[in-house]
Amino acid sequence: MDAIPIEDLPIHPLLLLAIVVALYFLPLIIAAWRNMPNAVAISVLNVVAGWTFVGWVVALVWSCLDRPERS
């Protein structure tokens, strides 16, 4: 099976790159949108270990957890 040349893709390469980057940083986007108190730690985990699938899933789950109630 031959690779598809980039010119023949049905989507513009820059749009494809933007989608891939947004998916990679999805845990950070969710944590920032939800105003998580540990958004910085989630972003560090996402940047450092997000390239592994396990690190990305852990960051995603962590960003979707309930926020602790503040007293």
Image (cartoon, helix red, strand yellow):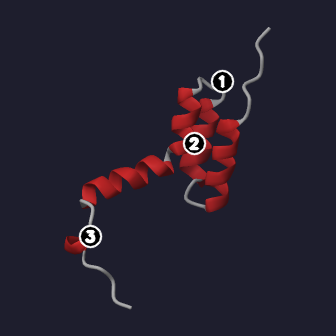
Mark 3 surroundings within 10 Å by alpha-carbon count, few (fewer than 14), some (14 through 19), many (20 or more):
few
Q: Kindly identify which residue carries mark 3.
A: 9
Is 61 placed left or right of 47 in the picture?
right
On-image quarter of the N terminus: bottom left
Is 12 placed left or right of 54 in the picture?
left
Mark 1 surroundings within 10 Å by alpha-carbon count, few (fewer than 14), some (14 through 19), many (20 or more):
few
Judge whether 30 appears above or below 69 on screen: below
State the residue lying farthest toward the bottom: 1
Between marks 3 and 1 in the image, the one whose residue lies nearer the viewer: 3
Judge whether 62 appears above or below 58 on screen: above
Viewer-proximal residue among 43 and 24: 24
- Residue at image position (34%, 56%) is 17
On-image quarter of the C terminus: top right
Image quadrant assignment for residue 3: bottom left
- Give coordinates of residue 61: x percent, y percent: 69, 44
Amino acid type, mark 1: Pro
- Residue at image position (34%, 50%) is 18
- Give coordinates of residue 9: x percent, y percent: 26, 70
Amino acid type, mark 2: Pro
Q: Secondary structure at mark 3?
A: loop
- Residue at image position (77%, 16%) is 69
- Give coordinates of residue 7: x percent, y percent: 19, 72
Q: Secondary structure at mark 2?
A: helix
Q: Kindly identify which residue carries mark 2.
A: 27
Measured in 3D between alpha carbons, the distance from the residue under mark 3 to the one under mark 2, in whole angstroms, is 28 Å
Measured in 3D between alpha carbons, the distance from the residue under mark 1 to the one under mark 2, in whole angstroms, is 14 Å
Q: Earlier in the sequence, mark 3 or mark 1?
A: 3
Viewer-proximal residue among 5 and 50: 5
